[in-house]
Image: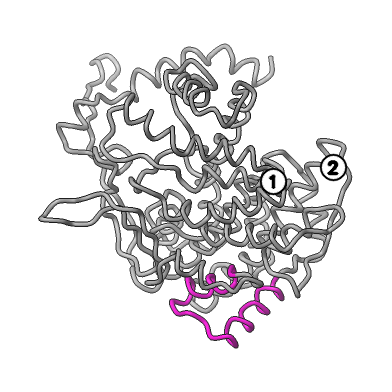
Amino acid sequence: MGYYEKWKSFTEKYQRLCVENDTISDDLFKEYGVNRGLRDINGNGVLTGLTNISKIESFKMKDGKKVPCDGELWYRGYNVMELVRSIPDHSFGFERFAYLLLFGEMPTKEEETEFAELVAAGRELPTNFTRDVIMKAANKDIMNSMTRSILTLASYDDQMASNDVGNVIRQCLNLISVFPMLAVYGYHAYNHYERDGSMYIHRPNPELSTAENLLMMLRPDKNYTFLEAKVLDVALLLHMEHGGGNNSTFTTRVVTSSGSDTYSAIAAAMSSLKGPKHGGANIKVMEMMNDIRANVRDYSDKEEVGSYLSRILDGEAFDRKGLIYGMGHAVYSLSDPRERVFKGFVERLSVEKHREKDMELYNNIEVLAPELIAKKRKIYKGVSPNVDFYSGFVYEMLDIPVELYTPIFAIARIVGWSAHRIEEIIGMNKIIRPSYKSVMEEKKLPPEDLI
């Protein structure tokens, strides 16, 4: 009998034992004042650190009380909405704002050019790396493929274990540079070896921005429009960083605090981000939207759209979990600033792609869903669309395969992870060691078992 056949015979027993012995009563969490998921009843995160990298605001203090407000997001003291508006119409912002997040200051024109050239120079993988590592074990999970590549890159770095700040900056910049290649090449390997598709390995162009290179390397003909690259650039810079309290960024800081190397810290962050509760939200939105399109005949009929959304909330439609994906956020209440600034670009792209009817459906859901959720759910704060509500729609219009949705998130968030790793090394210098209250029952072995 093989291992897996033998395992199946024990599965039910082992699962039952784990459920019996690992279940902890809700009453004990209340008794000891422990917040599940490090979040209180209002969804506010338990304070676990300090940062100078970014800030989120979802309420203001008025007469000593917290009053919900339109959400705001800052990178190094600058409002993200203003940063996006500051990008000239015919240029891109990813490299500029990556500099800002990493080094804490807005670059001059010369510094921005120097930094972009450095990132471009770093878009080079070791000899035969694509063939021997990325193509060797192609699979549908591109996040796993990228994580394997990250850890393998460590073996090519003679100073892999050094946490000298200058060395860590070099390592982080190199990973920021190669992430688009790891993602796109990983997808092409999977598409070729697992789906019998054609193989395209286009080398990055040092004259192009990160967003342009991503589209160029992905597409067989290398072609893209300026607006396509512009919208993708905005999507990347809006996903770069988010307050420091998210799961993958906290993972980066926890692993960094132990003294581990850059490659291990970023690989750990990747493993966190790939979790469907974190980085895969836009995939669920797209699955839901495809279901809505299949069941709603007139996208402009708000009554028909609202009726089907009610069925979703009642657990009678889509995945029967009673959730309208893309609505609500752990922090924001009245609005997600990333969604507010992103929506205008989404609308422009929908016109270029002749997807105005789909845009109308999204607009109607954006209006109707919060009203229905407020009526049917007991909520402690307002509900509004988050950035993931639209990001999947953008990726679909850009013909980006679903397998790359979360990797694109990683291509952006590697900047934030890097900034937090550097800040952790410079400013903290103490291992993160949380405390758990044991509620274990003490037991004694029977006398006959004692020697």
Residue nearest the viewer, comparing 197 with 363: 363
Q: Residue at x 25, y 24 (%)?
A: 25
Residue nearest the viewer, comparing 293 with 104: 293
Q: Residues within 10 Å of mark 1 (few under 14, many from 20)?
A: some
Give the number of the mark in front: 1 or 2: 1
**Marks 1 and 2 close (CB-CB < 8 Å):** no
Q: Quadrant of residue 445?
A: top left
The residue singled out by tag 1 in the image is 397
Q: Residues within 10 Å of mark 2 (few under 14, many from 20)?
A: some
Distance between mark 1 and mark 2 Cα atoms: 23 Å
In magenta stretch: residue 344 = no
State whether residue 388 is above or below residue 7. below
Residue nearest the viewer, comparing 57 with 131: 57
Name the image quarter holding the C terminus: top left
Q: Residue 121: x, y in percent? A: 71, 76
In the image, the segment drawn in magenta is 93-122
Q: Residue at x 44, y 61 (%)?
A: 256
What number is the disc on residue 192?
Answer: 2
Whichever of labels 1 and 2 marks the residue nearer the N terminus, that label is: 2
